[in-house]
Image (cartoon, coloured by chain):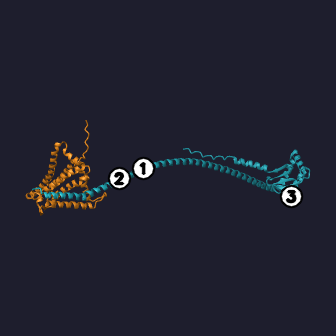
Chain colours: A cyan, B orange
Amino acid sequence: MLIDWFTVGAQALNFLILVWLMKRYLYQPVLQAIDAREQRIAAQIADAAAREATATQEKEEFKRKNTEFDKQRADMLSKATDEVKTERQRLIEEARKAADALSSKRDELLCSDAKNLHESIVRRTQAEVFAIARKTLTDLAGVSLEERMIAVFASRLQALDAAARGRLAEALKQSAEPALIRSAFELPPAQRAVLQQAINVIFSADIHLRFETAPAIVSGIELSAGGQKATWSIADYLASLEQGVDELLAKPVAPVKAPDAIPA
Amino acid sequence: MRLSPDEMIFWQHGWFKLNGTIVFTWGIMLLLAVGAKLITRNLTTEHQRSRWQNLLEIIVTAMQQQIKDVGLRQPEKFIGFLGTLFLFVAAAALCTVIPGYEPPTGSLSTTAALALCVLIAVPMFGIADQGVGGYLKSYLEPTVIMLPFNLISEVSRTLALAVRLFGNMMSGAMILAILLTITPFLFPILMILLGLLTGMVQAYIFSILAAVYIAAAMSTHEPKAPVKT
């Protein structure tokens, strides 16, 4: 007999036990492990998707902000450019004004310097002229400058036309104050006496004189009384000299002649 | 000459006997259970896992896929029964490389026991799925006249399951024994290799047929497409 029914029963039982054992020790643990892993992978994929979504969103946000930033920057740049332009204009204007101010100041300074120079030239010239005249007179004629000045002044008074001399004589007589003699330098008493006498003779009256030193009177003598005035000074000579010097300075410098080109 | 390991009796007390079939079956059970226990002891859910765990996962997922391919929607429900059928038959065949071992599936008692298990499991799964009425009604399909034929088919296919496996396994062992006496050197080795292949094929056939029978007993087929007129 090929079939042993006891063995059949035992084998069926054995098989059922084996089914239970396999379920318990093989299928359940393995399937659970697979499920757990798949769940984990699914969770990881979901997480990655979520992260990707977040990243995309952040990227978009970043892009938007970047664009906004670029726009703002461009706006600010153009604004700054405008401001700089305005500021530049303002600064240029200021600089121009300052330059103008400086230029005018410099002009003023130059004028003032020129004036000072002019004055000092005048003074120097005056002093030199007097020194030369004094020395020349002393050396050649044995007379002092003052003597000659008094003489010249007296001859000038003498040479006045009648109307002028009359007006001056009237003024001298009418004036309560003594007539004022102003000179560029101190007159010695002898010269004063000579002058007094000469004036007395010219105006035929005893005229009181008061002597004063006034450097402003350029190397000369001035008689003033009651608004009338008679003067002799070298100012006229100096003016003539000055004109001559000015003409000399104003003369353009002759250009230097260029050497002839050497023929090739 | 022994046709079946049933005849190899180690101990007997009345009708209770401890024959080779039972002892070898216990050996296989022990091997499978202890092996599974040892491997699944250190299961990990990480991406990095041991080779043995990989092997087990491949086997289990392949069985799951096969069951799904047959048409059973929830393979987890059937993998315990069908997977164990396959593993037991396959292990019984693979162990033939061990000298002195005789496959318990070479005994008609064992194959009959397995076929009986299938015979009982099919209506159990069918009733669990569509109820007693629904299941019994399937015997009347397509007409009442088919009832006896359906019943005969039920019994005959069970018988076929048992005899097919028994015949293949027994013949394999038998041919090997005969060949050993005639050409003792290379040829038996080739036959052993062929026997291993046959054993695997038989394990596959047995379990897949059981799956097909169960699938046929269940109403979870795809809904029929409406007929266009």
- Per the image, the residue denoted by label 3 is A189
**Farthest top residue in view:** B229
Say whether mark 3 and mark 1 are on the same chain. yes
User: What amino acid does circle 3 point to?
Assistant: Pro
At x 66%, y 50%, the residue is: A101
Query: Residue B209: x, y in percent?
Result: 19, 50
* Marks 1 and 2 close (CB-CB < 8 Å): no
C-alpha distance separating marks 3 and 2:
131 Å
Disc 3 is placed on an element classified as helix
> Are discs 1 and 3 less than 8 Å apart at CB?
no
Q: Are marks 3 and 2 in contact (CB under 8 Å)?
A: no
The residue shown at (38%, 52%) is A50
| Residue A130 seen | yes
Compute the Cα span from label 1 to label 2: 18 Å
What residue would you read off at disc 2?
A: A45
Q: Secondary structure at mark 1?
A: helix
The residue wearing badge 1 is A57
Disc 1 marks which amino acid? Gln
Horizontal side of residue A216 vs B28, given as left or right: right
Which of the two labelled residues, at mark 3 and mark 2, occupies the earlier sequence position?
2
In screen coordinates, is B197 left or right of A29? left
Q: Marks 1 and 3, Cα distance to the nearest angstrom?
A: 116 Å
